[in-house]
Amino acid sequence: MTFPQLTAFPVVVVEDVSWGDMDAFQHVSNIVYFEYFQNARIDYMTRIGWFALMKQRGLGPIVASTQARFRKPVYYPDRLHIGARVLDIGTDRITFEHKIVSERWADVAAEGQCVIVSMDYNAHAKAPLPEGLRERIEALEESVKMEKPQPQQ
């Protein structure tokens, strides 16, 4: 199943809501949404090879900030489509956008952003993004644009 709300997202992961994701108010706990965002972001960073680069060079991602806006309540049972895309690339950071679409609602349940900073885990300090990472991100983001049908003239 595909949703038009996620066509601009090069990475979309699908997860079922588990019973344990809900809180005492019988909807998914707000903290779990950040785990959903993280799962899509990890998939994205795996696809661009950041974790392989981390093993080679010691430069890896670390969360600097994150935020969410909750649009519709999610509860068990449901299946979620969680998108991740990059909004901005700096010299030492990447800003991700996330969007969660609920199959139950067939609409956006939550959206958010996360700033990831490049970290030199050996020096315990912020570092420039690993060489080649920007190009990998741009190629992945461009793949979504290429899949869209071009208007006929």
Image (cartoon, grey):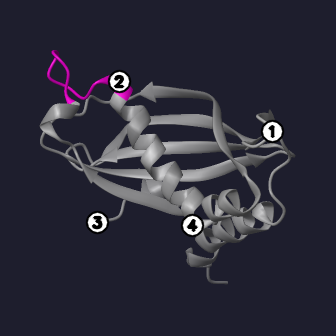
> What's the CA distance linking mark 1 and mark 4?
26 Å
For residue 96, which quarter of the picture?
top right
> What's the CA distance linking mark 3 and mark 1?
44 Å
> What's the CA distance linking mark 4 and mark 3?
22 Å
What span is colored magenta in the figure? 22-31
Residue that badge 3 annotates: 1
Judged by its main secondary structure, the magenta piece is: loop
Of the residues shown, which amino acid type is indicated by label 4? Arg
Task: Looking at the image, tell me whether mark 1 or mark 4 is earlier in sequence order.
Answer: 4
Residue that badge 1 annotates: 123
Q: Position of residue 130 (x, y in %)?
A: 80, 57
Q: Is residue 58 left or right of residue 1?
A: right
Q: Looking at the picture, tell me which residue is in the foreground, 8 or 33.
A: 33
User: Which residue, as the protein is rendered here, is positioned at the far bottom?
Assistant: 153
Q: Nearer the viewer, mark 2 or mark 3?
A: 2
Q: Say if 116 sits above or below 47 in the image.
A: above
Q: Residue at left 87%, top 46%?
A: 91
